[in-house]
Amino acid sequence: MATHTFLFTYSVSPFRSNYERDADVIRSRIARLDGRHGWTKLEDVETAFKGTLSLFESTQEGKRNEAEREIKEILSSVFDDEYPSHKFWINVALLVNGLTDIQEFRL
């Protein structure tokens, strides 16, 4: 196991314009992840977090996949029956120390 620091930024996009208020709720829920799961929200950048990830995979590709899975799992916790994931895209750009290149993915 290796511990890696990370930085990620995200954007929340509603599938339809009438979901914009719901998207604001999702943005607020993501912001409230500050201090949980080892994540710290950056003070002056509204949609960015830093923290640490414990990665167990041995290859670069395995670690990249593991990091993406962990971020997706935590971000998925902001959805529920009232605000389901099928109403939104969450686009993420993730940089993990020790791994090559930026990862971009979508929930």
Image (cartoon, rainbow, N blue to C red):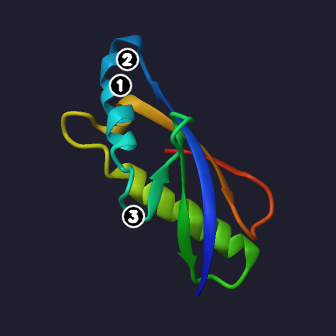
Label 3: which secondary element: loop
Between disc 1 and disc 3, the foreground one is 3
Tell me the quadrant of the picture where the N terminus can be found.
bottom right
Q: Residue at x 51, y 40 (%)?
A: 43
Residue 77 shown left or right of residue 70 in the figure: left
Relative vertical location of residue 89 with respect to residue 94 in this rendering, above or below: above
Which of these two is toward me, 77 or 46? 46
The amino acid on which the numbered mark 1 sits, given as a three-letter code, is: Asp
* Total marks placed: 3
What x and y, as percent, mark residue 9? 58, 42
First in sequence: mark 3 or mark 2? 2
**Horizontal side, residue 72 vs residue 85: left or right:** right
Helix, strand or loop under label 2:
helix
Q: Residue furthest right?
A: 100
In the drawing, does residue 23 fall left or right of residue 100? left
- Which percent across, then down, holds residue 5? 62, 66
Name the kind of residue labelled 2 in the image: Glu
Q: Bin the neighbour count of mark 1 within 10 Å (Cα to Cα): few under 14, some 14-19, many 20 and up.
A: some
Q: Mark 3 Cα within 10 Å, few/some/many (few <14, many 20+)?
A: few
Q: Dots 1 and 2: beta carbons under 8 Å?
A: yes
Q: Which residue is mark 2?
A: 20
Rendering coords of residue 18 (x, y %): 34, 12
**As drawn, which residue projects farthest toward the front?**
43
The residue carrying mark 3 is 37
Residue at the spot of label 1: 24
- Residue 73, how many percent across, how many down? 41, 59
Which residue sits at x=75%, y=67%?
99
- When asked about the image quadrant of residue 25, the answer is top left
Q: Quadrant of residue 3?
A: bottom right
